[in-house]
């Protein structure tokens, strides 16, 4: 029995540790044990007298193998054999000793020794199986750990790759952001230029109106001062003649003419000022402004401007100004631009309709003001064709225009909208197709 | 001589009255003033075509001086009143249109009153 165990043990160790390659010295010894055991097995079977000393030799051989396993570091992984085979070794030693010391005693207890041997063998087999199982599990765990390690390596690699990609993308995005910022700056400056050119365009439309509006008061100033000169001449003659009544009448006329000269001088002055204000970059300074006067002034400027540009253009214009409106705090050149824009649009609308030659149609533009509670309402109305429903929502969008390319910037209403918003007011449109349009501005007082 | 002056500038009345004060005093001329083309037509209807001379501004809101001229010359044929056009824009287009619509004369602002007076006196004779 001992030799069979040695044979199995030796071949198992040789196989699992691959001793032929890893430790040739021990391999030689193991081979000695292996073949020696086979030889002893054959001899035991062949010669019955050889049995007892053979058992001793086998026990000693097993003991020395276990000792080697115990003492040599190379066999650390196989040490479980010690605990597995130690009971068997002890049983063998006792059995052999008993047989040697008192064969009678041994024969009497033979059955017991046999059972003990069987149990020891079972123990050895059992613990071997358990250990193998444990080792399998250990190997599995090790494989798993190895796999995880591999996975971790892959993940680390991927992470590194990702970081490179992220860096690339970030660089690209930064570049795009810079490009966009550049484009935005360009757009902003273009917008500023457009707003300025829109202002200058509306100023261009105004020029003729302004010329007319200045020419008229200047004519009056010239005419009335000429008249006054004549009247003063007459006055002197009447004084010489002592005609006191006539003198009084003449003096009254001269005074009233002088008032008229003064009035028209101021009128021209106001127009020049508002033209300058219109072309100047807005200071954004709010000041108290007479809304009614502003409406009246821009209505006249717009009318005469369009009239000068297009001789066939004509329309009635009326004001319905509520004296209660008075002065409110606004940026005059900004609100002036809004008014000019709305009034110009109104005149264009009625002029368009006039060209359709509708019988009995009288083009008319009305500007009205009204004070209601804490706000002032300015309404610019026309009796043109109204705004078609499909474009009604777009009219306040920048660059939206119904005019032909090159004729309008499409910024007028959108700028007007922005200006009214900046004044914390509202602007909305009421329009009926075929009937006309009203733009209604509400400004807080 | 009855003269109707059509101009949207109301101060034109004071100017005319003073410039022609002697003529008005001497009842050589009689002035009426209206401030739009529409008012001018209404005035001519109401006063049964009294005015023999009409001085009209061209550039007025509503009915323009040119339209008024056209209407007057169409409506009142026998004898047609003398119509003089006055405009701040002494441009060729307005002049040509005025003449083609039958204007008798064409004056530009600022009005030269001594010239106007001469022309009026010539017509009065």
Image (cartoon, grey):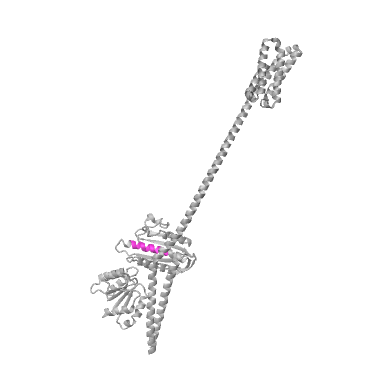
Question: Which residue is depicted at the point 43% across and 72% down?
Answer: A269
Q: Which secondary structure is most common in the magenta stretch? A: helix
Residue B4, relative to residue A343: is it above or below?
Answer: below
| Quarter residue A9 falls in | top right
Residue A102, relative to residue B72: is it above or below?
Answer: above
| Quarter residue B57 falls in | bottom left
Q: Is residue A304 visible?
A: yes
How many numbered dots are placed on residues in this image?
0
**Left or right for A20, reference B121:** right
Question: Which residue is depicted at the point 73% across and 12% down?
Answer: A107
Residue A17, percent from left and from top: 64, 25
Q: Is residue A379 visible?
A: no
Residue closer to the observer: A445 or A134 = A134
**Magenta-span inclusion, residue A214:** no
Residue A57, percent from left and from top: 71, 16
Going by the picture, which residue comes out furthest to the left? Answer: B78
Question: Which residue is depicted at the point 67% across and 11% down?
Answer: A45
Going by the picture, which residue comes out furthest to the right? Answer: A101
| Quarter residue A97 falls in | top right
Residue A67, relative to residue A240: is it above or below?
Answer: above
Segment colored magenta: A338-352
**Left or right for A318, reference A64:** left
Residue closer to the observer: A148 or A295 = A148
**Magenta-span inclusion, residue A349:** yes
**Left or right for A131, reference A366:** right
Image quadrant where one finds the N terminus of chain A: top right
Residue A316, percent from left and from top: 35, 67
């Amino acid at each position: 029995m001992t030799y069979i165990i040695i044979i199995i043990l030796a071949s198992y160790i040789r196989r699992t540790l691959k001793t032929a390659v890893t430790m040739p010295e021990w391999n030689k010894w193991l081979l000695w044990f292996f073949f020696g055991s086979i030889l002893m097995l054959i001899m035991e079977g062949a010669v019955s007298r050889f049995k007892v000393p053979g058992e001793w030799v086998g026990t000693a051989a097993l003991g020395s193998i276990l000792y080697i396993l115990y003492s040599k570091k190379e066999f650390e992984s196989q040490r479980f054999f010690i605990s597995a085979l130690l009971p068997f070794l002890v049983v063998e030693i006792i059995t052999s000793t008993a047989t040697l010391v008192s064969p009678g005693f041994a024969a009497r207890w033979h059955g017991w020794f046999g059972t003990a041997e069987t149990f020891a063998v079972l123990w050895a087999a059992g613990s071997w199986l358990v250990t193998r199982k444990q080792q399998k599990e250990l190997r599995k765990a090790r494989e798993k750990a190895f796999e995880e390690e591999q996975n971790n390596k892959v993940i680390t690699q991927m992470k590194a790759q990702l970081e490179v990609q992220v860096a690339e993308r970030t660089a690209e995005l930064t570049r795009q952001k810079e490009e966009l910022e550049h484009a935005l700056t360009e757009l902003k400056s273009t917008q500023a230029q457009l707003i300025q050119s829109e202002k200058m365009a509306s100023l261009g439309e105004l020029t003729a109106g302004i010329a007319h509006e200045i020419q008229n008061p200047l004519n009056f100033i010239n005419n009335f001062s000429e008249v006054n000169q004549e009247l003063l001449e007459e006055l002197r003659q009447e004084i010489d003649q002592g005609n006191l009544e006539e003198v009084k009448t003449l003096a009254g006329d001269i005074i009233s003419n002088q008032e008229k000269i003064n009035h028209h001088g101021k009128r021209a002055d106001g127009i020049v000022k508002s033209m300058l204000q219109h072309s100047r970059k807005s200071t954004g300074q709010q000041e108290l402004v007479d809304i009614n006067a502003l409406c009246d002034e821009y209505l006249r400027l717009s009318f005469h401007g369009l009239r000068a540009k297009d001789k066939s253009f004509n329309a009635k214009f009326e004001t319905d100004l509520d004296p209660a409106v008075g002065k409110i705090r606004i940026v005059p050149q900004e609100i002036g631009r809004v008014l000019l824009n709305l009034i110009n649009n109104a005149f264009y609308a009625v002029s368009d309709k006039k060209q359709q030659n509708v019988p009995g149609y009288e083009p008319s533009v009305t500007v009205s003001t009204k004070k209601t509670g804490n706000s002032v309402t300015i309404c610019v109305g026309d009796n043109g064709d109204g705004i078609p429903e499909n474009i009604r929502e777009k009219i306040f969008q920048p660059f939206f225009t119904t005019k032909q390319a090159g004729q309008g910037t499409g910024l007028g209403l959108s700028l007007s909208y922005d200006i009214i918003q900046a004044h914390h007011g509202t602007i909305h449109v009421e329009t009926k197709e075929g009937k006309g349009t009203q733009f209604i501005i509400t400004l807080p007082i | 001589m009855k003269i109707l002056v059509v101009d949207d500038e109301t101060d034109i009345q004071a100017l005319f009255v003073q410039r022609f004060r002697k003529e008005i005093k001497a009842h050589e001329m009689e002035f009426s003033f209206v401030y739009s083309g529409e008012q001018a037509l209404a005035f001519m209807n109401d006063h049964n075509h009294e005015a023999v001379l009409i001085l009209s501004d061209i550039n007025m809101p509503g009915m323009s001086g040119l339209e008024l001229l056209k209407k007057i010359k169409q409506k009142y044929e026998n004898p047609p009143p003398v119509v003089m056009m006055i405009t701040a824009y002494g441009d060729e287009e307005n002049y040509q249109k005025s003449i083609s619509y039958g204007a008798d004369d064409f004056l530009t602002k600022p009005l030269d009153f001594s010239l106007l007076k001469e022309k009026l006196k010539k017509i009065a004779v």
